[in-house]
Image (tube, rainbow, N blue to C red):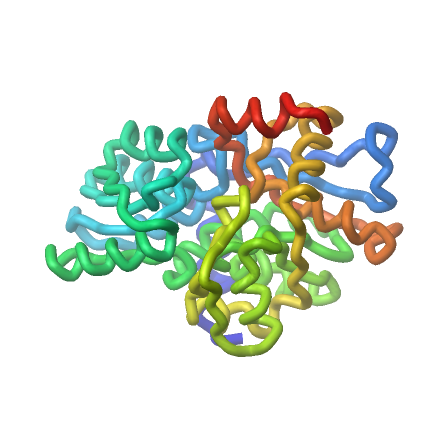
Amino acid sequence: MTGRISLERIEQAASVIDPVFLNSPELAFDPDEAPLGAELTLKVETLNPLRCFKGRGGDFMVRQLEGPAPIVIASAGNFGQGMAYAARANGIPITIFAAENANALKVERMRKLGAEVILEGADLDAAKDAARAHAERQGQRFIEDGREPAISEGAGSMAVELLRGGARYDALLVPLGNGAMISGIGTWAKAQAPETRVIGVCAAGAPSMERSWRHGKLETTEEAKTIADGIAVRVPVPEALDDMQGIVDDVLLVEDSETLAAMRLLLQHAGLLVEPAGAVGLAALMRHKARFAGQRLATPLCGANVTREQFRAWFAAPA
């Protein structure tokens, strides 16, 4: 481990973050509804004003800032909501760059939270480049998801809750995009329950983080083609890859068709609407039933921002 992410600060985050994001429900998936061959706990991170987990890291990150100086970020939408929510609460101006084809619902919500949102670039990584350039021109701070330890530490508060009271799991299946969530969760889990395997899950159409972790070096892809926009990473964050060393046991890939099947299963049998990035943990279990047979597992359902058009396309179509 690099030591960038602090156990003490994760524990602090679990007590100081805005309570609206803390102590999210942990639901056991009913095996009678859908036999998965394993015991699965769903960490439901969608029942808050942002419908995603990003309020945890956003709140804890903003708490580290000194004064009301403007900040600049890039986001596919959920990180932007988390940062915008916290920035508004603390009187900090925020500019958010998003891709030109970003989720319209997420863009609308970022703006309603008071952020200036600029659409530029073909994907998130292009929007990041534009955000960095803008911050440099304006003399403002650029904050990158996956690079800032405080964001990971805020996300790590989920693991504090999952393992509270001595709860134990054979493995945690964690959606893997920029890496902030898995680094925070994994750091706490490995310290408190070293026998628990921490397994990242990427979209097969956006495999840069999986390849980079597996090969031990930064690997980019020409495109990130997946419905899971929240984990559609083309250019990994080097610091995030460093943070994953020693705490991540494996990284799995799932196809979009498998993610859709998981989303439909969650809606039909658990009554939970989840966006693609939030369902990849369940998709990985469904794909690797034999590997996880008889085990105790947990996965965060980390987002539920779905547009009407997406709902019709993903849930109204035949399964």
Q: Give me the residue at 41% from left, 54% from top.
A: 151
Quarter of the picture holding the N terminus: bottom right
Work out which residue is located at the far bottom of the displayed protein and give it.
Answer: 216
| Most foreground residue, 49 or 106 | 106
| Most foreground residue, 162 or 31 | 31
Where is residue 227 shown, x and y percent of the image?
A: 54, 42
Asked if 248 appears above or below 301 in the picture, the reply is below
Q: Give me the residue at 40% from left, 29% from top.
A: 105
Asked if 300 appears above or below 3 in the picture, the reply is above
Quarter of the picture holding the C terminus: top right
6 left or right, relative to 315: left
Where is residue 249 shown, x and y percent of the image?
A: 68, 67
Where is residue 250 shown, x and y percent of the image?
A: 68, 66
Work out which residue is located at the far left of the displayed protein and give it.
Answer: 138
Where is residue 155 shown, x and y percent of the image?
A: 49, 51
Asked if 139 appears above or below 62 in the picture, the reply is below
177 left or right, relative to 285: left
Q: Give me the residue at 24% from left, 55% from top.
A: 130
Q: Give me the residue at 17% from left, 55% from top.
A: 134
Q: How many marks?
A: 0
| Most foreground residue, 119 or 190 | 119
